[in-house]
Amino acid sequence: MRACEFVVENGGTKDIEPTAKAAIKNAITHSTMNPSTGSAYLNYRMGVALAGAPTYPTKMEADNWIGGDPLMSSYTDEEYEMIIAASNVVGAGHGKNWSGKRSEEIPGTNKTSPIAAVKKNKYGV
Protein backbone atom coordinates (compact mmCIF):
# COMPACT_ATOMS: atom_id res chain seq x y z
CA MET A 1 0.00 0.00 0.00
CA ARG A 2 1.35 3.42 -0.93
CA ALA A 3 1.52 6.18 1.67
CA CYS A 4 -1.07 8.34 -0.13
CA GLU A 5 -3.49 5.35 -0.25
CA PHE A 6 -2.93 4.77 3.48
CA VAL A 7 -3.68 8.42 4.31
CA VAL A 8 -6.86 8.44 2.21
CA GLU A 9 -8.00 5.09 3.61
CA ASN A 10 -7.38 6.18 7.20
CA GLY A 11 -9.17 9.51 7.08
CA GLY A 12 -6.61 11.86 5.50
CA THR A 13 -4.84 14.62 7.36
CA LYS A 14 -6.13 15.48 10.81
CA ASP A 15 -6.77 19.07 11.80
CA ILE A 16 -4.51 20.77 14.31
CA GLU A 17 -5.52 20.10 17.91
CA PRO A 18 -7.41 23.04 19.48
CA THR A 19 -4.94 23.30 22.38
CA ALA A 20 -1.96 23.39 19.97
CA LYS A 21 -3.78 25.88 17.74
CA ALA A 22 -4.36 28.18 20.70
CA ALA A 23 -0.72 27.96 21.83
CA ILE A 24 0.99 28.45 18.44
CA LYS A 25 0.95 31.84 16.76
CA ASN A 26 1.07 31.92 12.92
CA ALA A 27 1.61 28.18 12.38
CA ILE A 28 2.62 27.94 8.72
CA THR A 29 3.36 24.79 6.73
CA HIS A 30 4.68 24.47 3.19
CA SER A 31 4.03 21.10 1.57
CA THR A 32 6.48 22.02 -1.21
CA MET A 33 9.30 22.00 1.36
CA ASN A 34 8.46 18.65 2.96
CA PRO A 35 11.64 16.56 2.65
CA SER A 36 9.71 13.33 2.04
CA THR A 37 7.04 14.55 -0.39
CA GLY A 38 8.30 17.89 -1.63
CA SER A 39 11.76 19.36 -2.03
CA ALA A 40 14.41 19.09 0.66
CA TYR A 41 16.50 21.49 -1.43
CA LEU A 42 13.76 24.12 -1.31
CA ASN A 43 13.60 23.56 2.44
CA TYR A 44 17.37 24.23 2.65
CA ARG A 45 17.07 27.37 0.51
CA MET A 46 14.25 28.62 2.76
CA GLY A 47 16.53 28.23 5.79
CA VAL A 48 19.28 30.22 4.09
CA ALA A 49 16.79 32.91 3.08
CA LEU A 50 15.43 33.10 6.63
CA ALA A 51 18.93 33.72 8.01
CA GLY A 52 18.93 37.28 6.69
CA ALA A 53 15.23 38.04 6.47
CA PRO A 54 13.81 40.67 6.40
CA THR A 55 16.47 43.29 7.14
CA TYR A 56 19.43 41.62 5.42
CA PRO A 57 18.07 39.68 2.46
CA THR A 58 20.29 36.79 1.47
CA LYS A 59 21.61 37.15 -2.06
CA MET A 60 20.74 33.87 -3.74
CA GLU A 61 20.75 32.87 -7.36
CA ALA A 62 17.64 31.27 -8.80
CA ASP A 63 17.35 27.51 -8.69
CA ASN A 64 20.16 25.91 -10.71
CA TRP A 65 20.63 22.79 -12.81
CA ILE A 66 20.86 20.44 -9.85
CA GLY A 67 17.98 21.92 -7.82
CA GLY A 68 16.93 19.50 -5.12
CA ASP A 69 17.64 16.40 -7.15
CA PRO A 70 20.09 13.85 -5.77
CA LEU A 71 23.36 13.81 -7.73
CA MET A 72 24.83 10.40 -8.52
CA SER A 73 28.11 9.96 -10.36
CA SER A 74 29.83 6.76 -11.41
CA TYR A 75 33.46 6.02 -12.22
CA THR A 76 32.84 2.89 -14.28
CA ASP A 77 30.25 1.71 -16.80
CA GLU A 78 29.24 -1.04 -14.35
CA GLU A 79 28.44 1.52 -11.65
CA TYR A 80 26.47 3.56 -14.19
CA GLU A 81 24.42 0.47 -15.06
CA MET A 82 23.81 -0.13 -11.33
CA ILE A 83 22.39 3.40 -10.99
CA ILE A 84 20.13 2.89 -14.02
CA ALA A 85 18.93 -0.53 -12.76
CA ALA A 86 18.18 0.79 -9.25
CA SER A 87 16.35 3.81 -10.71
CA ASN A 88 14.18 1.50 -12.80
CA VAL A 89 13.39 -0.70 -9.79
CA VAL A 90 12.01 2.23 -7.79
CA GLY A 91 10.23 3.70 -10.82
CA ALA A 92 12.39 6.80 -11.14
CA GLY A 93 13.39 6.19 -14.77
CA HIS A 94 16.78 7.05 -16.25
CA GLY A 95 17.11 10.62 -15.03
CA LYS A 96 19.13 13.17 -16.96
CA ASN A 97 22.85 12.77 -17.65
CA TRP A 98 24.28 16.30 -17.45
CA SER A 99 27.91 15.55 -18.22
CA GLY A 100 28.15 12.52 -20.51
CA LYS A 101 29.99 9.27 -19.87
CA ARG A 102 33.56 10.60 -20.03
CA SER A 103 35.50 12.83 -17.68
CA GLU A 104 37.60 15.45 -19.42
CA GLU A 105 40.08 18.11 -18.41
CA ILE A 106 38.55 21.54 -18.16
CA PRO A 107 39.60 24.03 -20.84
CA GLY A 108 42.87 25.73 -19.94
CA THR A 109 44.31 22.81 -17.98
CA ASN A 110 48.03 22.18 -18.61
CA LYS A 111 48.30 24.81 -21.32
CA THR A 112 51.44 26.34 -19.81
CA SER A 113 54.17 24.63 -17.84
CA PRO A 114 54.53 25.54 -14.16
CA ILE A 115 58.27 24.81 -14.45
CA ALA A 116 60.50 27.68 -15.56
CA ALA A 117 62.29 27.28 -18.89
CA VAL A 118 65.95 26.28 -18.73
CA LYS A 119 68.17 29.34 -19.00
CA LYS A 120 71.11 28.96 -21.35
CA ASN A 121 74.50 30.39 -20.48
CA LYS A 122 76.64 32.53 -22.79
CA TYR A 123 77.87 29.40 -24.59
CA GLY A 124 74.32 28.26 -25.41
CA VAL A 125 74.41 25.31 -23.05
Image: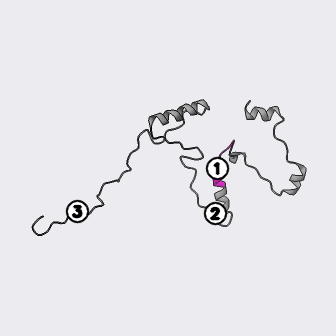
Q: Earlier in the sequence, mark 3 or mark 1?
A: 1
Magenta span has 43?
yes
Instruction: Identify the coloring.
Output: one colour
Main secondary structure found in the magenta portion: helix
Task: Using the numbered discs, state the Cα–Cα distance from disc 1 to disc 2 in whole angstroms.
Answer: 17 Å
Q: Which residue is mark 3?
A: 117
**Residue at the far bottom in the pictured view:** 122
The span picked out in magenta is: 36-46
Looking at the image, which residue is at 57% across and 30% down?
A: 88
**Residue at the far right in the pictured view:** 19
Q: Is residue 28 above or below residue 55?
A: above
Q: Which residue is mark 2?
A: 57
Circle 2 crowding by C-alpha within 10 Å: few under 14, some 14–19, many from 20: few
Amino acid type, mark 2: Pro
- Where the C terminus falls, by quadrant? bottom left
Magenta span has 123?
no
